[in-house]
Structure formats: C-alpha cells, structure tokens
Amino acid sequence: MTATAFEPLSYGHVPSPVEPLPHQLLAALGQHRMATTGQLHGLLRPGAARQAVSAPLNRLRQEGLVDFAVLPRSNRARAWYLTGEGVRMVRDFPALRGRPPYPITSATAASLKTPHTLTVVRSHLVFVADARRRGDEHGHLDWTPEMSHPLSDGERVIADAVMHYTLVGEGQRTKLRAFVEVDRSTMASERLASKLIEYARLWSYDPQPVGRQRRQPAAGGGAVWLRWYPVFPRVLFVLTGASRQVLENRISDLQAMVEQHPLVGALARQVPLGAAVLEDLELEGPSGEVWVPLGGGAPRSWTAL
C-alpha cells in the first residue's frame, strides 16, 4: 500500500486557547478578590504599557462587571474588585470553580479589605516576577487566597494563600506548594506564632471513625491534608509593616514556637518552615538568601528551606 501524506482536518476558524485579557482580568479579580491597576499590570502584562490594562478595566466597569475604590494617600490609585454581576459571571470559569464567591458590595466595603488583601497580592507578585526571570512556572492563578482546611472539633485553619510553583531545570520539573501567611504586624506576635500550632494540627490531623481508639498524632496514610496535597506544603511567613527590629523579633518568636511546642517541633522536622521580610523579597527576589529557617540555620532561598 502506498503511503500518503497526512492531511490535517480543517474546521474553519479555531478559537485561540489563550484567554483574552478582559477574561484574564475578571479571573484574576475573582481569584484575588481585589487588586490595583499596577498589580494587575504586573500579573498579566508586565511588558506592555499601563494603558493595555487600564483601558479594558474601564470597559469592564462600563459593563457593570467591575468597580474600584480609590486608595487613600496614593495619588488616586484604584483598587479593582468584581461587582455582584461580575461574581456571577466568573463563578463558572473553569479555573474558579469551587472558589467561595465573597462579593464586595460597595467601595466602602472594599476600603475595609484593601490593606491586607493588597499586601497578599503584593506578596504574590514577587513570586510571579521571580518565576518569569528564572523560567519557572507560576502565574496569576497559581496563588489561591483564603484557603480553608478542617481541623478537629469543627475548627478550621485558613491560609492567607496556597501557592503552587513549578521549578524548571534541565530535563526536570519539580512541583512545590506552600501555605503563605502574610503578616502586616497588626496582631500580637504570640498570636502570629500560634498559627504554627494550627498548621501542626492540620499536619497531624487523622480523623478516626466513631468508636475506634485514636492513634497517636502522625502524618500517616489517613491524614486529612492528603485529600488535597501529595506532600504537605511548606509554610512561609511574609512579614512587613514595622521596623526591621520589630520584624526580626517576630521571626524570633516564630522560631521559639518551633523550639517550645512539641507538635510544632515535630512539624519542623518534616516540613520546611521559613520567614522573610516582604521588602527583602521585593529587593532580592524570593529565590535569594532572604528566608530564615524557623528550625534554625543560615538564611537561604525558599526552595532550599
């Protein structure tokens, strides 16, 4: 039989697999709840003029899908968020299925959320920029804020964000995950350090059927976190909002919790734990030697904790 050249099927126009920018803007706001024009520019179009992002945002506002709050003391910078109609539109986006909708109902409500929400996005941006520079894989949807996980007795631990990041090397791809806690120095240092106890409880939480004798806490085959992760994510604390001395003291308190709490100490022997100052991440990148291992040791990259 004579071989014939393969002729590809033709169905006329084939839509691009790349989402258009307005769709990406809606998805980014659905994922992050809120972001400034500059942050959206950095997430989605860092090499383009600022107008490339601000123009479609204004069109989406005219269509009633997004709105903004003006940030105080910012030369009228805008923090964008989805309207109720925008929330209804994005809830069926494949990337956002299952995300709780938490709509922001007014500019006043937005202003109450801006400090923490925008600092979390600011923390995400340093990883996005570093991934681009290094050739790794980490985009605007690889960072999921406000992720909740169950603990015993009906309690829950809520991470400021869960990060998915893929290191790309020669012929190798390494998938990393992290729980990220963003601290603006607005809570007591002891309360911040107690967050480590919550993660240690999640790591060891192994629900038992009613009537069965409870095993000793251990991250074994029945650990609840295995529903979502093949390996327990590392825990990263990003600190800002105070003097260098205050931030160093808060990191020391995190290290003291590792030393003094037996379950947290057990977690630290199995899971990488680290803390860094946000301004250092912006200056040197998260792959710089700016992370303090909470279990002790010299500063290093977050991937080497």
Image: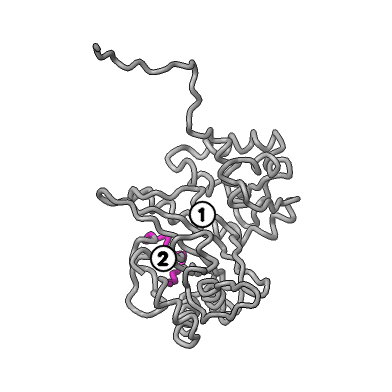
Report how many numbered discs are placed on residues in the image.
Answer: 2
In the rendered image, the residue lying farthest to the top is: 2
Q: Is residue 60 visible?
A: yes
Whether 275 is among the magenta residues is yes
Would you name the residue on which mark 1 appears? 143
Residue at the image point whose x is 58% and y is 81% from the top: 213
Q: Which residues are magenta?
A: 273-285
What amino acid type should be assigned to the residue bearing mark 2?
Asp
Residue 89's place in the image compared with 259, above or below, is: above
Q: Is residue 182 visible?
A: no
| Relative image position of residue 43 (x, y in whole percent) | 49, 47
| Relative image position of residue 106 (x, y in whole percent) | 75, 50
| Relative image position of residue 167 (x, y in whole percent) | 35, 54
Would you name the residue on which mark 2 appears? 280
Say what secondary structure mark 2 lies in.
helix
Residue 168's place in the image compared with 258, above or below, is: above
In the rendered image, the residue lying farthest to the bottom is: 260
Q: Residues within 10 Å of mark 2 (few under 14, many from 20)?
A: some
Whether 85 is among the magenta residues is no
Residue at the image point whose x is 65% and y is 57% from the top: 72
Residue at the image point whose x is 35% and y is 61% from the top: 287
Residue 272's place in the image compared with 5, above or below, is: below
Q: Residues within 10 Å of mark 1 (few under 14, many from 20)?
A: many
Please give left or right for residue 129 compared with residue 217 in the image: left
Please give left or right for residue 68 compared with residue 136 in the image: right
Residue at the image point whose x is 57% and y is 63% from the top: 160
